[in-house]
Image (cartoon, rainbow, N blue to C red):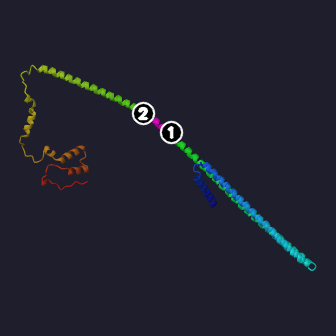
Amino acid sequence: HGQNKAASNGSDLYRDRLRVEFPGRPYKELQLRIRVLIEKRLFRRKKNALLTQWERDKRAVLEEAASQTRVAAMAMEFEEELAAERDMEEVKRQEIKRIHSSNVEKFLIKKKIEDQQRAQQEAEAAAAQIRKEKQRQRELEANEERLREYYAEKTEMERKKQQELMEAAILEEKLRRKRAIVNKERVEYRMDLLEEKQHKQLEKKLEIEREEMEQQRRLDLLRQQVASQFEHVGIDKDRVIQNTKAYQHALDAKNFKPLFEVHGYNIDELMQDQRFKIATALQAAGLHKNSYAKQVILKAHTAVQSRPSMVSNFELKD
């Protein structure tokens, strides 16, 4: 996981560096360059691995040659020693030679096995590294495929959204046209009602004018009928503007002294009090039982000065 993350960071570094070096190049060309760089890096690693293996094999061959040389030298020395003692120790020399040959063979077999194991381990390590690089490449391609799918889905969603907006606009236009038709019918209906109302008003006005003309005609006719009966009545301008007998009789009644003394208030005196006026208006509206109305009545100012004995200690509460 750490190696994959490091490889991903390396690809990001390649991409950032290429964007800096080639700011005008498209995204696909940058990705192609990244792939080329990764392929070059894999080739270099494979080449280095092969060269390292070749060096190791070369050292193994040289070591094997040196070992053989040392063994040959040892064998020659041993043969010289044996040649000096051949007659006396032939059996011992043969046994020693057999033991030596067996040891050399065991040493060579062991060394060969170790070299094979080392080469196998190095080959497995190189194969594992190659598999990791291939896995990293597959992951990179999978990420690119997911990016392409994401941009394709995003483009499709934007297209569907634009289509929905266009359909909504078309539907709104249809509704607006329908409302315009309905509004036009309403306006026409209202215009018809207005014309009908104006027509009725005109007919009513003409009817009033005809009634006034008929009334004037009747008055003129009545005036002509009574003109001969009131020829002796003269013109009196003062009599026109003076009070009538009924109104004068009412004025004279006010100046009369009442039969009994009045200890309360009459309506004129009560209406001089602003509080009485407000209370009367609130009672007529049916709001006199409201707490706010009571507070308004209490706070109202009046020009009538109350007697000290008429001051009440009663307080209205909500």
The C terminus lies in which quarter of the figure?
bottom left
Could you say where residue 290 lies in the image, as x and y percent from the top left? 26, 49
In front of the other: 283 or 84 = 84
Q: Which residue is drawn at 75% across and 64% down?
A: 55
Q: Mark 1 points at which residue?
A: 166
Picture quarter containing residue 317? bottom left
Rendered image: mark on residue 131: none
Q: Tell me residue 106's x, y (percent).
A: 82, 70
Reading the image, the residue beneath label 2 is 180
Kind of residue at disc 2:
Ala
Location of residue 243 by image quarter: top left
Measure how far apart labels 2 and 1 are at the Cα level: 21 Å
Residue at position x 8%, y 28% in the image: 237
Chief SS of the magenta region? helix
Point out residue 247 in the picture as x, y percentages from the top left corner: 10, 34
Q: Is mark 2 on a helix, strand or loop?
A: helix
Which of the two discs, 2 and 1, labels the residue nearer the N terminus?
A: 1
Judging depth in this view, the residue of 245 and 236 nearest the camera is 236
Q: Where is residue 275 in the image (x, y as percent from the top left)?
A: 19, 48
Answer left or right for 317 relative to 71.
Answer: left
Would residue 282 be found to the left or right of residue 35 on screen? Answer: left
Q: What stretch is highlighted in magenta?
A: 164-180
Q: Residue furthest front?
A: 21
Camera-near label (2 vs 1) is 1
Name which residue lies at 13% across and 43% down. 268
